[in-house]
Image (cartoon, grey):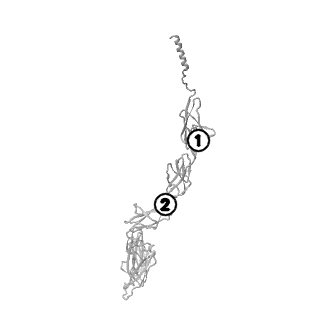
């Protein structure tokens, strides 16, 4: 290139270099970007620069890299019923416990945590107690509990002693009281929240009762011959609620049916043997009392027979006459003897009496514990001065007979009807008493001389059953009317008759 051209090119280059803009240079102090985050533990509010939240929050900022990261001053405000505990990952401000300074970070830093604590105790009350103010071996308690932070546990206590806990609603617990002594105890319930605040209810008095109602059998028969035995029981217990009864063979278990105290309970007992009457009584809180009464069903009369003494219809000398007999039965026996239809008296296997001239009767009634009877009876004629008495053929006058009925009640008729027969001379014959509802009594009279025969007329089992069906109350307004008739003859064969109408009340 020519020298002139080289100079021109250099001048042009220099001119371009002076006119062209220089290249872009980086700033001397670049910016750094970072953030802060806040987290709450409990119920409250956090505020700060760019932060105003009641839940997790955050804020961002930028600063030159030659400067320290900026800080954000946070303020904690607890909600009502809560208190502020403190900060984590945040620098406290001296003298201001509710505030702290958190530094922005360009990296993922741990959040600043504000911790709040629930200081309000739960509310709790006993809603119901079942079966009530009185309980037996078990009681069910229902409580109502609530808290702003939730209820974590409800405890149930008796006399301050823990009996059980429930951890989820419903707050209901069935408590075992079998080891609690009888008497009045105090029931309480205690509720807890997550912060372990607790509230205990006021005392709820409860009476603990483990004893069943008292049961007394009303004179239960040890043995019976009835087709449908009946029993009754009473209870003086104020908390008596209900009862069930059964009449069953011993060794068997029959279904029980409802029964009432002081009322007859009856069931069929078709076979003889060992039976039992069972009462299961319950009180108001479910305590039970069981009473069992064993008894015997026996419908077989005692085995009895004369072993010595004059034969029936024989003639004997005046003076002492003795009869002896044997009697056996599986049950205890009662023996009653009577001479000439007079009043019965206890005897035991033998009886002796001095007889005057005339006709005489002897009767022994052997009764077992179930009410079955065997009657031994004989009639003899006693001689006078060694001769056999003959009827007085010149006597044409009938004996004068009078009847009288002692005052008696329906209950006594089941055993015997008492009737007095007066005869003006020695006489014998039959007495019959009848009434409505199929009631009938009959017996014989034999007087060796003028006087009064005090009779106890017994009746059949069928009639006794009818008598039991008559209510004593009904007899207060409508007494049982009875009619007695006596037809007696003297030794000459003259017959006299007497009648009597009388009433029996309850």
Q: Which residue is mark 1?
A: 76
Assign a secondary structure to mark 1: strand
> Which residue in the structure is indicated by mark 2?
284
Q: Quadrant of residue 351?
A: bottom left
Image location of residue 345, percent across then percent down? 44, 75
Furthest toward the right, the residue is 95
Near-viewer residue (484 or 58) = 58
User: For the residue carrying disc 1, how many other residues have a C-alpha within 10 Å: few (<14), some (14-19), or many (20+)?
Assistant: many
The reply, left or right, for residue 109 in relation to residue 456 is right
Q: Which of the 4 image quadrants contains residue 27? A: top right
Tell me: residue 365, above or below residue 191: below
Figure check: 403 above or below 49: below
Q: CA distance from mark 1 to mark 2?
A: 59 Å
Residue 358, position as x, y percentages in the image: 39, 83
How packed mark 2 is, by other alpha carbons closer than 10 Å (few <14, some 14-19, many 20 or more), is some
* Secondary structure of the residue carrying numbered label 2: loop
| First-in-chain label (1 vs 2) | 1
């Amino acid at each position: 290139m020519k020298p002139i051209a080289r100079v021109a090119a250099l001048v042009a280059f220099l001119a371009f270099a002076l006119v062209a803009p220089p290249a872009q240079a980086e700033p001397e102090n670049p910016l750094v970007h970072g953030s802060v985050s806040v987290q709450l533990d409990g119920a409250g509010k956090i505020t700060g620069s760019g932060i105003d939240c009641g839940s997790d929050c955050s804020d961002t900022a930028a600063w030159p890299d030659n400067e320290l990261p900026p800080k954000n001053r946070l303020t904690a405000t607890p909600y009502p019923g809560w208190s502020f505990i403190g900060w984590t990952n945040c620098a406290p401000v001296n003298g201001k416990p509710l505030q702290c300074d958190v530094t922005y970070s360009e990296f993922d830093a741990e959040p600043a945590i504000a911790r709040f604590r629930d200081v309000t105790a739960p509310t709790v009350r006993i809603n119901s107690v079942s079966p009530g103010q009185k309980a037996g071996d078990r009681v069910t308690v229902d409580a109502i509990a609530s808290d702003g932070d939730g209820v974590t546990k409800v405890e149930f206590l008796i006399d301050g002693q823990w009996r059980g806990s429930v951890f989820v609603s419903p707050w209901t617990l069935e408590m075992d009281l079998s080891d609690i002594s009888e008497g009045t105890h105090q029931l309480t319930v205690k509720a807890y929240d997550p912060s372990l605040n607790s509230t205990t209810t006021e005392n709820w008095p409860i009476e603990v009762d483990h004893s069943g109602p008292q049961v007394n059998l009303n004179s239960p028969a040890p043995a019976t011959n009835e087709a449908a035995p009946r029993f009754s029981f009473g209870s003086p217990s104020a908390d008596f609620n209900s009862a069930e009864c059964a009449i069953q063979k011993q060794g068997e278990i029959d279904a029980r049916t409802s029964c009432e105290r002081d009322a007859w309970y009856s069931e069929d007992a078709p076979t003889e043997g060992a039976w039992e009457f069972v009462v299961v009584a319950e009180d108001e809180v479910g305590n039970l009392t069981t009473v069992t009464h064993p008894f015997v069903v026996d419908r077989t009369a005692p085995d009895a027979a004369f072993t010595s003494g004059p034969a029936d219809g024989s003639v004997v000398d005046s003076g002492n006459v003795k009869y002896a007999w044997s009697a056996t039965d599986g049950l205890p026996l009662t023996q009653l003897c009577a001479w000439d239809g007079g009043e019965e008296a206890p005897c035991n296997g033998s009886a002796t009496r001095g007889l005057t001239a005339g006709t005489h009767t002897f009767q022994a009634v052997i009764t077992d514990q179930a009410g079955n009877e065997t009657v031994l009876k004989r009639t003899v004629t006693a001689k006078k001065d060694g001769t056999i008495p003959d009827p007085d053929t010149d006597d044409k006058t009938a004996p004068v007979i009078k009847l009288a009925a002692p005052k008696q009640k329906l209950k006594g008729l089941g055993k015997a009807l008492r009737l007095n027969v007066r005869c003006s001379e020695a006489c014998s014959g039959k007495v019959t008493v009848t009434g409505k509802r199929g009631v009938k009594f009959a017996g014989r009279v034999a007087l060796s001389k003028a006087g009064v025969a005090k009779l106890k007329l017994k009746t059949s089992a069928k009639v006794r059953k009818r008598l039991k069906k008559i209510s004593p109350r009904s007899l207060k307004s409508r007494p049982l009317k009875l009619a007695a008739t006596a037809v007696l003859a003297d030794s000459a064969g003259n017959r006299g008759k007497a009648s009597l109408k009388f009433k029996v009340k309850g």
